[in-house]
């Protein structure tokens, strides 16, 4: 396992790729979502997530961490995996849940950067972590609220459809 600056570079590389996959997912889901609330959630958070991506990539460059072709190839591979997973998740609800998982992963990464930056006296790492964690927390809270609303709507829709079907097949109703 890497140590010192090599370890920091590798973790920043990982964060850049993971966060880029999350950002691309938001962009795709903004375009594909049928539910206007989901589209709006993506639209409101994309600019902030782009700023986080810019901060991560800028820090990555300052560290002399991996960039260019190798990073892009790995990022594309992650993107292809996300696209294949999205094919199986055809509903806005399942796409939203997937985005929440990725946002939480980023939130945890930013939290680690915040605390490590504080402990190491690395103000830039601390600030990146502080900002990213705070904004991802806001996204997760809003996304969870929407997921809960959508969940209830799907259950109620299924319950209403079941009750209607039962009424049609039950004699005397």
Image (cartoon, grey):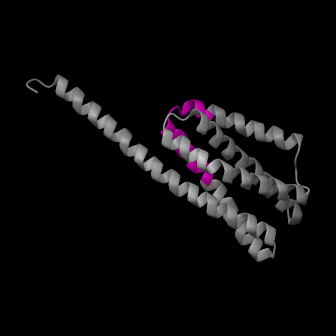
Q: Position of residue 45 (x, y in %)?
A: 62, 50
**Residue range highlighted in magenta:** 85-103
| Foreground of the two, 85 or 143 | 143
Q: Position of residue 165 (x, y in %)?
A: 23, 26
Q: Position of residue 39 (x, y in %)?
A: 55, 41
Residue positioned most to the left: 172
Number of marks in picture: 0
What is the quadrant of residue 105 in the picture?
Answer: bottom right
Q: Relative to residue 33, is residue 136 depicted above or below?
A: below
Quarter placement of the N terminus: bottom right
User: Which residue: 64% across, 60% down?
Assistant: 108
Residue 102 lies in the magenta stretch = yes
| Foreground of the two, 35 or 105 | 35
User: Which residue: 63% across, 43% down?
Assistant: 26
User: Which residue: 20% across, 28% down?
Assistant: 166
Q: Position of residue 29 (x, y in %)?
A: 59, 38
User: Which residue: 87% across, 41% down?
Assistant: 70
Q: Relative to residue 85, is residue 101 depicted above or below?
A: below
């Amino acid at each position: 396992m890497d140590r010192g600056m090599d370890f920091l570079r590798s973790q920043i590389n990982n964060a850049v790729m993971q966060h880029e996959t999350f950002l691309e997912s938001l962009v795709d889901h903004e375009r594909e979502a049928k539910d206007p609330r989901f589209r709006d959630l993506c639209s409101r958070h994309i600019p902030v997530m782009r700023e986080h991506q810019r901060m991560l990539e800028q820090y990555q460059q300052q560290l002399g961490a991996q960039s260019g072709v190798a990073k892009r190839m790995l990022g594309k591979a992650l993107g292809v995996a996300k696209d294949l997973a999205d094919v199986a998740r055809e509903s806005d609800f399942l796409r939203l849940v997937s985005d929440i998982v990725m946002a939480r992963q980023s939130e945890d990464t930013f939290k680690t950067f915040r605390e490590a930056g504080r402990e190491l006296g690395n103000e830039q790492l601390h600030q990146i972590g502080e900002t990213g964690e705070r904004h991802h927390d806001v996204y997760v809270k809003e996304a969870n609220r929407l997921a809960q609303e959508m969940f209830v709507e799907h259950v109620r829709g299924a319950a209403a459809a079941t009750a209607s079907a039962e009424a049609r097949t039950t004699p005397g109703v």
